[in-house]
Image (spheres, rainbow, N blue to C red):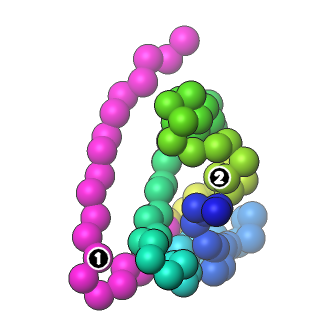
């Protein structure tokens, strides 16, 4: 099962007029769909994905391609009753 963020629309390069929209797709029966976002530099995001792979949490191929965030930002539209938690971490630059 792929746990990808489902992209509804995104701004074209140089035309960042609309925010990137993430929609919650239909979950499979008996399963809850969770959306994971990793936001940071290209190297940081790839490092986090690799780390989650090493922990056997998620296969690298299950993640979407890297997406540049438009200047207008990201719009997340939760379903009624959903909650949100954010973890911020600093990583050592090499």
Residue 35 image point, x, y percent = 47, 64
Q: Is residue 86 a member of the stretch shown in magenta?
A: yes
Within-10-Å neighbours for mark 1: few <14, some 14–19, many 20+: few
For the point 44% across and 17% down, the residue is 92
Residue 72 image point, x, y percent = 52, 69
Relative horizontal placement of residue 33, taking residue 5 as reference (left or right): left
The answer to whether mark 1 and mark 2 are in CB contact below 8 A is no
Disc 1 is placed on an element classified as loop
What residue is pinned by disc 2? 63
Residue 43 image point, x, y percent = 61, 31
Residue 25 sits in quarter: bottom right
What residue is pinned by disc 1? 82
Magenta stretch: helix, strand or loop mostly: loop
Residue 91 image point, x, y percent = 42, 24
For the point 67% across and 42% down, the residue is 60
> Distance of mark 1 from mark 2, alpha carbons?
22 Å
Of the numbered discs 1 and 2, the one sitting upstream in the chain is: 2
Q: Is residue 76 above or below residue 26?
A: above
Q: Nearer the viewer, residue 47 or 52?
A: 52
For the point 64% across and 43% down, the residue is 59
Q: Is residue 83 a member of the stretch shown in magenta?
A: yes
The quadrant of the picture occupied by the C terminus is top right
Residues rendered magenta in the picture: 74-94
Q: Is residue 79 above or below residue 72?
A: below
């Amino acid at each position: 099962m792929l746990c990808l963020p489902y992209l509804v629309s995104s701004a074209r390069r140089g035309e960042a007029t609309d925010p990137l929209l993430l929609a919650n797709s239909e979950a499979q029966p008996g399963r809850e769909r969770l959306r994971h976002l990793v936001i940071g530099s290209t190297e940081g995001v790839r490092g986090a994905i690799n780390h989650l792979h090493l922990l056997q949490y998620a296969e690298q191929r299950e993640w979407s391609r890297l997406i540049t965030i438009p200047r207008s930002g990201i719009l997340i539209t939760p379903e009624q009753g959903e909650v949100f938690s954010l973890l911020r971490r600093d990583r050592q630059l090499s």
